[in-house]
Image (tube, rainbow, N blue to C red):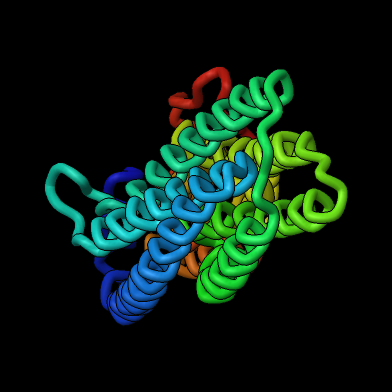
Amino acid sequence: MSSHEHEEAEHEKGGHENAGHTHEHHHHETMEAQESGGKLLASILITTATLVAEVVGGLLTGSLALLSDAAHVFLDIFALALGYVAVRLSKRSATGIHTYGFHRMKVLAAFINGATLLFVSFEIIREAIGRFAHPQSIIAGPMLIVATIGLVANLLVAFVLKGHSHDDLNARAAFLHVVGDALSSVGVIAAGVVILFTKWYWLDPAMGIVIALVILRGAFSVLKVATHILNEGAPEDAENTHVAQEISELEGVKSVHDVHVWALDPGFRLLSAHVVLDDQLLSATHAVMDRIKDMLTEHFNITHTTIQFECGDCGQCAGNDVKV
């Protein structure tokens, strides 16, 4: 029996069984997107108020650390707004052109946010170096008040976003923006206290550099993951050879080849594979398909699969593909 006939029969038999699961999965993703969008919108409003306070405070006090933190807050708003737009787009249904929908928009938003983090970090470091050469006096009292307001606001936003920062790279990028701001506010407060009593104005640009390094760390982390996903890389815990080995050990499977695992975003994993079985009745292959799908879901959280059954190696395996 040809692989095409296998696929058509499997699709017909499994379509009714999987319809309820697919609808439930789509409904769950839609609800999560709505909740995430609402939290991002609330975070935008809180962060905008913080930006106004820090810009005014930084200009009045002359604090580079405070203005650096304000620049990061501005990027927070950009990150949150971009994230919100991406969430709205990701809710759109698949089309004939975009057959998987718009899930990748969230990853693209995370990549852009990571790039903006890099930019602001280098700008802060450049300005801090200039301040070391030409120190400026700082009004420490108001600087402390504004920094404290910023810290409270950042902690509030971080608390709002925390629940969505695990599997959602877009939310994670926005969360890292805000956590970086919270740490920055702590640094500004510490520098302000010391300057208030010692007049060591050099601490202000020094803290600006520390803030920049914190931002850089988060930026590289987000860019690394986003680039990996955009380049169709396999998730760390679902590397091709490992997945292929697990499939090949299942009852009824002779061998596996042409295995590909990738993700549209960290929570949306996909797999395609050619699975070689003994020549048998089509009805007997249904049990094998169930075993494969159950294993992929339980071991690797892969729920979207395209599996082609064959009675022999089709010869399509490229030189860099997995073959077990």
Q: Quadrant of residue 86?
A: bottom left
Compared to residue 264, the image places residue 201 above or below, namely: above
Q: In the shown orientation, is residue 66 left or right of residue 98?
A: right
Q: Nearer the viewer, residue 206 or 319?
A: 206
- Identify the residue shown where x is 44% and y is 57%: 51
Residue 70 appears at what percent x and percent y?
Answer: 51, 49
Residue furthest out toward the right: 198
Residue 285 appears at what percent x and percent y?
Answer: 45, 62
Residue 108 shows up from this direction? yes
Residue 58 appears at what percent x and percent y?
Answer: 53, 48
Q: In the shown orientation, is residue 271 left or right of residue 24?
A: right
Q: Nearer the viewer, residue 140 or 205?
A: 140
- Identify the residue shown where x is 28% and y is 56%: 85
Residue 278 shows up from this direction? no
Q: Quadrant of residue 25?
A: bottom left
Q: Nearer the viewer, residue 283 or 242?
A: 242
Compared to residue 91, the image places residue 26 above or below, namely: below
Q: Nearer the viewer, residue 203 or 224?
A: 203
- Identify the residue shown where x is 27% and y is 51%: 102
Count the labels in the image.
Answer: 0
Point out the image quarter for the C terminus. Answer: top right
Q: Quadrant of residue 108?
A: top left
Q: In the shown orientation, is residue 27 left or right of residue 196?
A: left
- Identify the residue shown where x is 68% and y is 22%: 134
Q: In the shown orientation, is residue 114 left or right of residue 195?
A: left
